[in-house]
Amino acid sequence: MTNLVEIRDLRVEATTDSGRRVEILKGITLDVAAGETVAFIGESGSGKTTAAMTLLGYARPGCRICGGSVRVDGRDMVALSEKERATLRGTTVAYVPQSAAAAFNPAATIMDQVIEVTQIHKLMPVEEARHRAVALFRALSLPNPDSIGDRYPHQVSGGQLQRLAAAMALIGDPKVVIFDEPTTALDVTTQVEVLRAFKDVTAKRRIACVYVSHDLAVVAQIADRIMVLRHGEVQEIGSVDDILHRPAHPYTKELLHAFHPDGGGRVVPTTTSHTEPLLDISMLSAGYGPPQPNGKPLVLAVKEVSLQVKPGTNLGIIGESGCGKSTLARAIAGILPACDGTIQFNGRDLWQSARQRSREQLRDLQIVFQHADTALNPAKSIEEILGRPLTFYHGLRGKARDARIDALLDMVRLPRALRHRRPAELSGGQKQRVNFARALAAEPKLILCDEITSALDTVVAAAIIDLLKELQRELGLSYVFISHDLSVIEAICDEIVVMYRGQTVETIIPAERQEPQHPYSRLLFSSVPKLDPTWLDTLDLDADRMRLA
Amino acid sequence: MKTPSATGTLAAWSGYRINLVGLVSFCVVLFWALMALLAPYITPHSVGAMIDMDYFGPMRPGLWLGSDYLGRDMLSRVIFGARYTVGISLAAVSIACFTGVVLGMTSAVLGGTVDMVVSRLLDAMNSIPSKLFGLMVVAAVGSSIPVLILTMSVIYIPGSYRFSRALAVNIDTMDFIMVARIRGERLPYLIGSEILPNIIGPVLADLGLRFVFIVLLLSGLSFLGLGVQPPYADWGALVRENIGGLPFAAPAVIVPSLAIASLTISVNLLIDNLPQKIRDRSAP
Amino acid sequence: MKTRVPSLILGRLFIALITLTIVSFAVFFATTLLPGDTATILLGQSATPEAIAGLRTAMHLDEPALLRFLYWIVGLFQGDLGTSYANHVPVATLIGGRLLNTLKLAGLTTLVSVPLALTLGITAAMWRRTLYDRIVTIATIGIISVPEFVIATSAVLVFAVYLKWLPALSFTYDVNSFSGLLRAYAMPVITLTFGVSAQMIRMTRAAVIETLNTPYVEMALLKGASRPRLVLRHALPNALSPIANAVALSLSYLVGGVIIVETIFNYPGIAKLMVDAVSTRDLPLIQSCAMIFCVGYLLLITTADIVAILSNPRLR
């Protein structure tokens, strides 16, 4: 079998702000055979997307292919002129972007953009192209295949756009398709459908695929071989089976380990039903928009939710985007005052709005946000960020404050020297630790964690979860953990609440090996990709989907 | 623009990337600032003294920039003009931007009715063309230097407000503001410690731009005879006085025009080519 | 979705109406701040107290300011712009023909500057970071940094003093012949075009460049699209709204520019009329001219906003 793609000693360099050149790909060599799917896996900044894009002869502004060759179907994309590359793009090699929502031109209809490739390269008459497009829409199991093309991108959902982007890539009958994290922005239940559609279509046409992802479980479903990248270097290339079961490289092992977080390490506190709950929410409703005649806001995002958190235990809230879990967190924190229901904290009623709560109540209930990038003021040093709550809540100043800042940095396992840096000079994981340390500075009883690991790479996220468990042992905190990621929640929570359309549908206690009963919980739990390569092919979700609809 | 090697070493030394265009514009701005500051000590002749027998005299030794329509030394008059043009504009821009920025940040943080009322009012003020506003005030209360300063600051408050409010609204959506709010922080801390440090760069650049607008407006009003009044003369007034020399291309009309252009163009270019802090994330 | 556009436009018009009310309020009170008694100014120092008192009553000068404001507004709606203090001629008569002259000047400038500026702005964005782009950028920075009267005096220096192609003053030629018309309007139009175009070029260029940096343009590039196709098919349709906005906003610069240009070229337009009225403190004339300018300005910026709403594909 001849190789369709042959990458030899590929090097890409980027020019930094100061004009210094940095190699971001340091000599990559890889072959892809016709009809084969190779996954590029690695954390953010590993160079996986950069590597995939070189197959199109493209490097993002500021980057430059500076060495090696990328032969696609016998032609070296590096050596070709820009004009010659343009003739191959869309016809020989095509691209499916990470965010289809951004990659569609908002001013043109979907059909015009899907068939654009055929017009640019004068492949076929418009009518024929339209027919092909509709056939592709059908093959990708899109709803209303005959009319969906007449819509504008903003009128279509994210999962559908992602499949439409695939149709856009496939219309020119390419030999190679690059999928750049095409399901990362999607919910798990949607991800399953999209993955299945991709797999069917590419297998039928025997298209060679390069699949870029950070998610080993997703990759396991779709790839034949996996290339593990880190810092622009290939760590390991092997078949899916080899990588999953016989990883040779330490980094690969780390990745695999992060996938199986040990639920242990925590001693579940002995709480009896007689223990007073720390947080007791009953019939809480909250929403957005102007109040309606019935006194409720226009959009009710949380409907009559009741839950309890006992001291020293953790509650997980899981659900997909739009289920109201973040709104619930904001209502508990008093950011978005609830319109109905009560919040009891430590035995006393809390005001719905944070503005009316006492300083002590605010101190005892802290919230940590998902994006450390926006949660830390970029204009301030770590010292100032951690120092403010110390001064504000505890009146600490001077030496006492400095000592406490050092202690906080120790607690979250950050070197003390970081105190003089700004957030931008820290890595993503370090920023999230500072973000968490700021909440600890208040010495709270309960911390609301809103998707705090979602923006982090798997390995880094696993380390944060370990840290949280350790701190809980030392400080006797409670967490309310909000996430869309089941594995994270399972690793740390004593009780899991499943939210769907603003309501809690089920409470699950993992320690009791309880199986989900509600059709939505079952759909959600079974949609989480497993490392088993046969998982996708044997999965049957239709029964639950039907019962939900 | 590629940095030449000479400025390259400067960049390495200061930690900032310095651009040649920026450097030159900075020197021009500095030059005019010094002229304005030191005017009484460096003018070769008294501004009012008629020393040339001829009017609209050409450039020659002793009268380096020629003479004006009354035979007065243009060099001295241009140096003193810098004082009025730079001084009045600087005062006006300081008042305008201080008021605008404080109001803008406050509106962004408070939101709701306060924001709506202040925004509506200032937007309405913004829909009076600036020259027209100047004309009306001059028609109503006459033209004196304090009135000019106040009028021009009032004219440019809405612009400064709009700009800083837009920036502050962006910052206000950030989670760290939310964190500070639910910590229980009050308005002065929020705008002074959380928002201002994040918008100060663009705000200063905007101040520079607004300074240019004010110089242009002041010169325009003076050119119409409605700005700085004799015996004082800013650069716009100098052009007006000497417009009669235009058909002979007299230096008396060209030099003050060039002075205005050199100042405003330099400020604009300086803003576009400010030294940039070298942020090299991959550096150790 | 479809119902949002009309309501957005109505909202914008409503805001314009409120703004106009506030503006007319401001115009009226700014001009009545004038120290001294209007009746005395009108009749002169030698007038008898009875005559002054009579005129005060006739002009409602003794009534509260708010009421006078209402009389004034109602008068404006009925076409009664008041009587000039300086020569006792109805303001409407004074303004009539001059407004037309100013509109002609503005219209000609628009006709010249819009196509010129759009072409330069779009091409500069298309060939970004080339010598051409750099020259256009530097020239526009230079022009917007300079007051209109400097552009005007330079234009006079170049075209009238050195080249002797054109007259330094308007209306010294017979405007009935085409060449005469061209020469009479040339200098003011050139001056205004410089100012208006420089703004428009800058904003157009920025708008196109911003859309060229979007992921969907990168996607089109990866589909094999050529550079002209990227700009014309993908960037431009999305830059339409900021460009239309830029055009309307830049044209509002005409309002300020025309004041200087009419004065310097002695052009018999409404701006010249107003500047003269300011020096004679002829309040009714100033108020009316100011209102005309404010309405024109408001019309342009409201148009800019409405165009932006209409050309937003997400609202289609």
Image (tube, coloured by chain):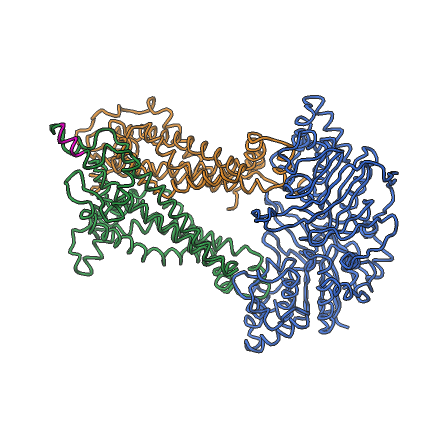
Q: Position of residue A279 (x, y in %)?
A: 75, 38
- The residues colored magenta run C49-55
Q: Nearer the viewer, residue A358 or B152?
A: A358
Which chain is blue in the picture?
Answer: A
Q: Is residue B140 left or right of residue A283?
A: left
- Does the magenta segment cover residue A420? no
Q: Position of residue A42 (x, y in %)?
A: 74, 53
Which chain is orange in the picture?
Answer: B
Q: Is residue A490 left or right of residue C117?
A: right
Q: Is residue C42 left or right of residue B75?
A: left
- Total labels: the figure holds 0
Q: Position of residue B244 (x, y in %)?
A: 20, 39
Q: Does the image show residue A31?
A: no
Q: Position of residue C255 (x, y in %)?
A: 31, 47
Q: Does the image show residue A466?
A: yes
For the stretch drawn in magenta, the main secondary structure is helix
Q: Residue at x 39, y 40 (%)?
A: B265
Outermost residue on the front side: it is A294
Which chain is green in the picture?
Answer: C
